Amino acid sequence: MFSFNKPILLRKALGLFLVGERRRRRGGGGVVMESTLKELTNGESVLDIKDKCGVAGGVEDIYGEDRATEDQTITPWTFSVASGYSLLRDPHYNKGLAFTEAERDAHYLRGLLPPTVSSQQLQEKKVMHNLRQYQVPLQRYMAMMDLQERNERLFYKLLIDNVEELLPVVYTPTVGEACQKYGGIFRRPQGLFISLKEKGKILEVLKNWPEKSIQVIVVTDGERILGLGDLGCQGMGIPVGKLSLYTALGGVRPSVCLPITIDVGTNNQKLLDDEFYIGLKQKRATGQEYAELLEEFMSAVKQNYGEKVLIQFEDFANHNAFELLAKYRTTHLVFNDDIQGTASVVLAGLIASLKLLGGTLADHTFLFLGAGEAGTGIAELIALEITRKTSVPLEEARKKIWLVDSKGLIVSSRVESLQHFKKPWAHDHEPVKELIDAVKAIKPTVLIGTSGVGKTFTKEVVEAMASLNPKPLIMALSNPTSQAECTAEEAYTWSKGHAIFASGSPFDPVEFEGRTFVSGQANNAYVFPGFGLGIIMSGTIRVHDDMLLAASEALASEVTEDDYLKGRIYPPFTNIRKISAHIAAEVAAKAYELGLATRLPRPSDLVKYAESCMYTPLYRSYR
Ligand SMILES: NC(=O)C1=CN([C@@H]2O[C@H](COP(=O)(O)OP(=O)(O)OC[C@H]3O[C@@H](n4cnc5c(N)ncnc54)[C@H](OP(=O)(O)O)[C@@H]3O)[C@@H](O)[C@H]2O)C=CC1
Ligand SMILES: CC(=O)C(=O)O
Ligand SMILES: [Mg+2]
């Protein structure tokens, strides 16, 4: 075993190279549509931002040493080569019984492993066999998390090869239960916890994370975890799960992914009273205290990782989510998955469904149950797509979209008391309290559930949709399964097999009157991994709505005739890596078109480039 320090001279030389590279690129220039960018870059010129980024594969000062002034402290990182016992304990490099004879000799592993040498394929077979023995989903979740901690490549190999079977384990619905019980099942931290205790020290906390070159952060404050409410610090299961999908579904290397939970307390009394709760035992900080912590976090991320780190906001409550997005979308590379990622996925399903329903989006009438992040986010993207495809102005396009919240239909007489994100949807209509009455009054062709409340699409509601439409499109998007507005079985049986159905959490196929219906999973997991890959691989500096539309079109185009025949408006997850490459390529293409991409020259075949960027979990040979 030996260790070495990264030679300072080499870094200095690379720094000089960077300066030269920047000058060269500044002189060479590219075609940049400055007008498109002004709004997204807070008035900063793109060349300034590109310059800060260390354009186009330039060597970045990832350790912050070159940037630090003399009075600032830096971290003395050293790199060491793992071998022997520590190699077996390092999840990035551990291969367990798959270490070859030669590797066992070269890396001081003799005696630390039993004599058998297994292939990765055999290991995979064994783990899948063991997983299937567990009847309780949470046990499968824990077994998968243990595997991720023990042997990262095997974990991702399993997830990629068995995606339909394992997605419900590491993601919704099981991740919801895992978050509820996170304190009890907590073994080792899988991401960074930043609490109010770390105020003033967030930059130092980021430096404690072992990986220095981070490209994607998924961050939550745990206040709206799926449809399960405020789970405080235990929301960590969500960023961890989302980022494992970035790798498995989108091919983003695990080492560049960083899950973060910001702990400002919780208003969940059950958790505050729970002796195993792992977070701050106090009520949530709000107002200035909250805003200051978030501001420090956002600045520290940019300072530590540069301009091009993608920050995905996840499962914030809507009273913070919209504000954070509005505040940081012009200064940081951010998007909100619940508002924007969900919108992109649902729009894809709607575009695809037109093959079954007929007409254009503008010909349909949409009714939402739930007017929060997901509901209004989807509504706005539908309206935007209509304006892009027709000459209809946005205001006009919005008029075919109606939303119901906990107080009933959103109508103009309520406008004064509505939260700002609901106001565009307050159309002229008399007040309507109940969903069933709204269905009868609005006569929607599409019904979308984004309420977070289970069982709200009752038999009466589904029957009303079926009586109004030959093929009612019903989406029960709320997660986890317990919060779904209705089940697949309910949608198909109550509509007598006429509904086209999709849901946020997966349902098994349903037999009805001799036909098998396979519902699609309308979940943002279809889009964010490919969307993120497209951004990273093109060095994109800001998220633009047209990139979300590009992702929707890309996903919709992947639905096959065979899918339609089965009643699905989303492709199966089995092909997701191919789909993600396609989404990444379209997102990147749009970013280049908008002048937001900094990786130059633009690769000519973006799909091939996306595929070539993807992480593969096959074992590597060690010299
Ligand atoms: N499938 C997917 O990819 C995604 C699914 N989701 C799911 O969507 C759900 C909602 O998330 P999000 O939009 O962020 O949450 P929000 O809290 O922002 O919004 C919830 C909305 O539902 C309304 N609501 C609550 N209860 C009722 C009720 N009984 N009847 C009518 N309306 C009701 C609320 O009304 P009021 O405003 O009056 O309080 C609010 O408008 C969650 O379950 C989440 O898991 C979210 C993102 C992605
Ligand atoms: C899927 C997702 O992001 C949610 O339910 O919040
Ligand atoms: Mg979410």
Image: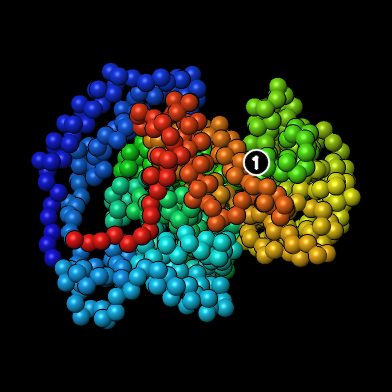
Callout 1: CB less than 8 Å from ligand 1: no
Residue 438 image point, x, y percent: 84, 46
Q: In which quarter of the image is the C terminus?
A: bottom left
Viewer can see residue 42: no
| 345 sits left or right of 40 in the view | right
Residue 390 image point, x, y percent: 70, 25
Q: In this view, does 604 lie above or below 113?
A: above
- What residue is at 55 percent from the left and 56 percent from the top? 574
Residue 20 image point, x, y percent: 20, 26
Name the foreground residue: 86 vs 317. Answer: 86
- What residue is at 13 percent from the left and 35 percent from the top? 13
State the count of labels. 1
Q: In this view, does 236 lie above or below 324?
A: below
Q: As shown in the figure, which amino acid type bears the numbered disc 1?
A: Leu
| 614 sits left or right of 403 in the view | left
Q: What element carries label 1?
A: helix
Viewer can see residue 551: yes
Name the foreground residue: 381 vs 405. Answer: 381
| The quadrant where residue 120 appears | bottom left
Residue 585 image point, x, y percent: 48, 38
Sort mark 1 into few (<14), some (14-19) or many (20+) by Cα contacts within 10 Å: many
Q: Is residue 409 above or below residue 588?
A: below
Q: In which quarter of the image is the N terminus?
A: bottom left
| 199 sits left or right of 489 in the view | left
Residue under label 1:
347
- What residue is at 22 percent from the left and 72 percent from the top? 101
Name the foreground residue: 78 vs 500. Answer: 500
- What residue is at 40 percent from the left and 39 percent from the top? 609
Name the foreground residue: 274 vs 8. Answer: 8
